[in-house]
Image (cartoon, rainbow, N blue to C red):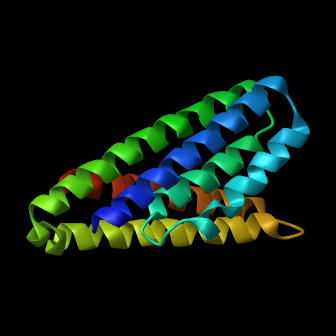
Amino acid sequence: MPADNDSILAEFAAKLRGLIEEGARALEREDQAAIRLVQQKLNHFPDESPSAADALDRTALLAAIDLDAANTRDAAARIRSRSDEVARLAKLIDAAAQSAAGSAETLRLNSVRTALTSATDAISAFKSLREQLKSDKPDESTIKTEITQIIDSIQLLRNRIEKV
């Protein structure tokens, strides 16, 4: 991953963290207009982010869903945890950049490809969920199944990233 991509990813991680913190503040104020505005920004984040920012995209979309939660206190806690997750992802990006700079051969490992496949699967599952939520009559059982698939995909991705 070239150094330019690393700085771009770090920039988008900072942007996402700012959006998530803005959402948390809007939740704390119970400002519905601000919440909707942040949701729109979070939903458009994947459209603006680089293709290598799948984990950030997933976090943005999960944060947008958290803003929809009925219980404001629970949603505020979850949205704060997303901010922490973005910070963790930023560290992972930095660590990956340092590792890549040290050895281009590391990037060719099968475990990296497997982790990327898991990330792609997780993003695909999340996009499917997003489409289901956009429908006029979302099916609750389908949504529940898709959320379970996303959680499983994310856990698998985290496990594979830790092995890299």
The answer to whether residue 100 shows anywhere in this view is yes
Work out whether residue 1 or residue 73 is closer to the camera in this orientation and state it: 1
Q: Quadrant of the C terminus?
A: bottom left
Quadrant housing the N terminus? bottom left
Image coordinates of residue 114 in percent, x first then y, are: 27, 71
x and y percentages locating residue 49 in the rendered image: 55, 65
x 69%, y 50%: residue: 64
Q: Is residue 30 above or below residue 123?
A: above
The residue that appears at 27% across and 58% down in the rendered structure is 160
Tell me: residue 32, above or below residue 152: above
Is 71 in front, or is 142? 71
Position of residue 134 in the picture relative to residue 122 (left or right): right
Give how far across and how far down residue 87 sits, in percent. Answer: 43, 39
Residue lying at 69% horizontally and 63% vertically, measured from the top left: 44
Q: Is 129 situated left or right of 28 in this image?
A: left
Is 87 drawn above or below residue 116 in the view shown? above
From the top left corner, tell me how far across and down residue 65 is, in percent.
70, 50
User: Residue 141 is drawn in which quadrant?
Assistant: bottom right
